[in-house]
Every structure is written in structure tokens, then in C-alpha cells.
Amino acid sequence: KAGVTQTPRYLIKTRGQQVTLSCSPISGHRSVSWYQQTPGQGLQFLFEYFSETQRNKGNFPGRFSGRQFSNSRSEMNVSTLELGDSALYLCASSLVGTATNEKLFFGSGTQLSVL
Amino acid sequence: QQQVKQSPQSLIVQKGGISIINCAYENTAFDYFPWYQQFPGKGPALLIAIRPDVSEKKEGRFTISFNKSAKQFSLHIMDSQPGDSATYFCAASETYKYIFGTGTRLKVLA
């Protein structure tokens, strides 16, 4: 069974641009969540989707948005990029995302650099 | 606002030694406490997890100790090996999301 696939692996953008990251969950997984990883800050929760509905959102500005498609694939978008958005963006999938006892499977992430 | 505090930030241990990483949480509604291991260039992978109705869980060389009254939990790695060198994250779960600690970079010297 294929793991969580994130594309692209690396991205370089300039301030003010927007970017879209893609995540394909493990087959059969319906919950997809996104995390931002920066040195010293650990993993910060962005949002979680299940059956195309956003069920929870972290404390990030509205420039960060996401969506999930009927096949459970997900995208996240960051508009008007800022230097501070440079980070590793991780996608994780799980069966139904109810958290308790449910294992998260992470992709290798998209490394975004904003110049 | 960091709801899960993790320490130390970095740790160097000799091969065969015990590595100990500690985490403390505030929200008593958390109901699941996993530890994730991350190697460079890879996403985090679940290592071991515990529920708050259990005080200890052991899987091979990895043990979680959980103190519900103190709202603390820790990861012990026995007989640490160079292959254990990685970043470790504790986490706590609430509705539809995980709160992660800031990570501990472990280096095991050969």
C-alpha cells in the first residue's frame, strides 16, 4: 500500500506570490490534516478535512486555506506569501481522524522557501 | 500558545545509554499521547502511544511513562543505538487534531 504522497517536494517562491501544495492520502483514509513544521516550533496544526469538510482549524491567518476532494486528496494554498511562511509543510492521513487511538501517517512534506 | 511542553531541546547519549525525553501538558481533555520519530528528510512516524488510563507502556526498547495527576509523560529509550538518532516529538490529541511538542533532537554516539 502506497504511503502519503506530497507534491512538490521542494518549492521556492518570492514574497507576495501564492502557492498550492498537494497531498494524496493512503488509500482508504478519509481524514487529511496539515501541519507546518519550523525549527524550534515543532509541528503546528493548520487544518483537518474529512469527506470534503473542514472539521478543525489551527491559529493561522486566512492566507492559509485548504480543501479536500471527493477522492480524499487534499490541497492547501497559501496566498500573499511572507518570509515567515518558509517551512516544511506536512500532510498526514488517517482512517477517520477521530484522533483517539488513531494513527497518523505523515508524508515526507513539501519544503517551501520564500525569498 | 504551546499546550504541550517538551524538554530537552537536544540530547546526546552514549551508545547503550538511556535517553529520556519529557513532556508536560495542560489540557485535561487530551485523551491520547503518541510519540513520533522523525529522520532527516522524512515525515514523522508513530513510535509508541499511550492512553491516560495506563501508567506505562513498553514496546521493545521504548517505554512511555505517564503521570496523569502531574500531567506529564516521558519517553525512555533503553540501550540507545546510533540508529535512534532522530528528532522525537511528543503529542496529545484533542478533537480532530494533534498538539505537538517542539521536538527533541537526539544524537546517540557510537
Image (cartoon, coloured by chain):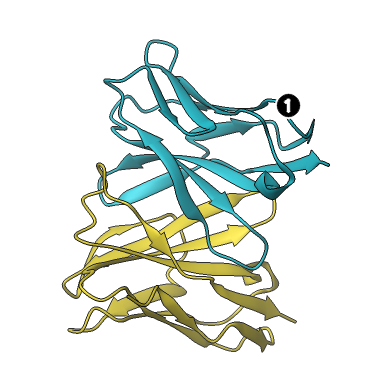
Chain colours: A yellow, B cyan
Question: What residue lies at 59% left-to-right and 50% top-to-bottom?
Answer: A42
The reply, left or right, for residue A28 in relation to residue A1 is left
Instruction: Name the residue furthest top.
Output: B69
The reply, left or right, for residue A48 in relation to residue B58 is left
The reply, left or right, for residue A101 in relation to residue B15 is left
Q: Is residue A43 above or below residue A15?
A: above
In terms of secondary structure, where does tag 1 sit?
loop
Quadrant in which the C terminus of chain B is drawn:
top right
Foreground: B7 or A26? Answer: A26
Mark 1 belongs to which subunit?
B
| Mark 1, residue position | B17
Q: Is residue B82 above or below residue B40?
A: above
Foreground: B41 or A45? Answer: B41
Q: Is residue A104 above or below residue B110?
A: below
**Numbered marks: total:** 1
Q: Position of residue A57 (x, y in %)?
A: 34, 58
